Image: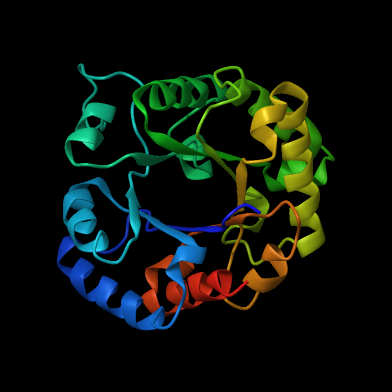
Amino acid sequence: MRKPLIAGNWKMNLVSSKVPAYFKALDEAMAGADRGRVDTLLAVPSPFLSTAREIAQRSGVIIASQTIHDKADGAFTGEISIPMLQDLGLSWTLIGHSERRQYYNETDASVAAKTRASLAAGIHPIVCVGETREEREGGRMVEVLDRQMKAILDVCTETSDLTIAYEPVWAIGTGLTASDAQAEEAHAFIRGVVSQRLAGLSERLRILYGGSVKSSNIQGLLAQPNVDGALIGGASLDPAEFGKIAKIAAAR
């Protein structure tokens, strides 16, 4: 059985001075939980990666970057490199989040390049895939996920250590929600694509669901055979709510 991973993405929110209080509240929310039964992670803004790591390690929470560059150094103003992450003692990153694809023109090719660089450096990437509302309503979910996953799998092997996050872009901040069955359908398809290419990877690969996850719907999502956790946006800014979600996952 794959251990659930509950990952939060703070996006461009909070400030460094608020981090200690956040983790204090998170610890309180998770009191009594068997933390060995769930992995918890927070992807935080780069200015306070170091502060968050120092505080989070006492709680057993993994800290990740929200993105990385595929080059180790160079004239790339505003970017964060893998060596910079490693120097901070970090070994996880998000790659290809829907907002990075939408607002910063990240493509299947650039996502694959970042994934390749991360895997080569021993950084664990959580690689995001998912279809937009237009693509969903046009009946193109399978086409989009197949294309995105094949680009990622081109740079993977049977032993690659990565996580996939399925983000139905149409269900993020729109008021629309995917049903448990819709989430399972997409996750099962993704695992099937992996199985066809890299059978040894498919069964141990964790696939997270990332579309308006809350404590009120996490139980049903985790009950699906191919849903191994969640990538949580807005709800992760509330330590009590995020802790409640993780606690529910740990109790399964």
The residue drawn where x is 24% and y is 36% is: 85
Q: Position of residue 147 (x, y in %)?
A: 70, 25
Q: Is residue 110 above or below residue 161?
A: above
Where is residue 210 shown, x and y percent of the image? Answer: 59, 55
Q: Position of residue 181 (x, y in %)?
A: 82, 59
Image height of 170 relative to 91, above or below:
below
Image point (62%, 52%), residue name = 2
152 versus 227 height, above or below:
above
In which quarter of the view is residue 62 placed?
A: bottom left
Looking at the image, residue 193 sits to the left or right of residue 53; the answer is: right
Q: Is residue 79 left or right of residue 62?
A: left
| Residue 176 visible in rendering | no
Q: Identify the residue at horizontal 51%, vertical 36% (top origin).
A: 162
The quadrant where residue 91 appears: top left
Left or right, 182 with reference to 7? right
| Residue found 19% across the figure and 53% down from its top | 48
Q: Nearer the viewer, residue 212 or 184?
A: 184
Q: In the displayed structure, would residue 59 be above or below residue 94? A: below
Where residue 79 sits: x, y (%)? Answer: 26, 31
Quadrant in which the C terminus is drawn: bottom right
Within the image, what quadrant is residue 175 found in? bottom right
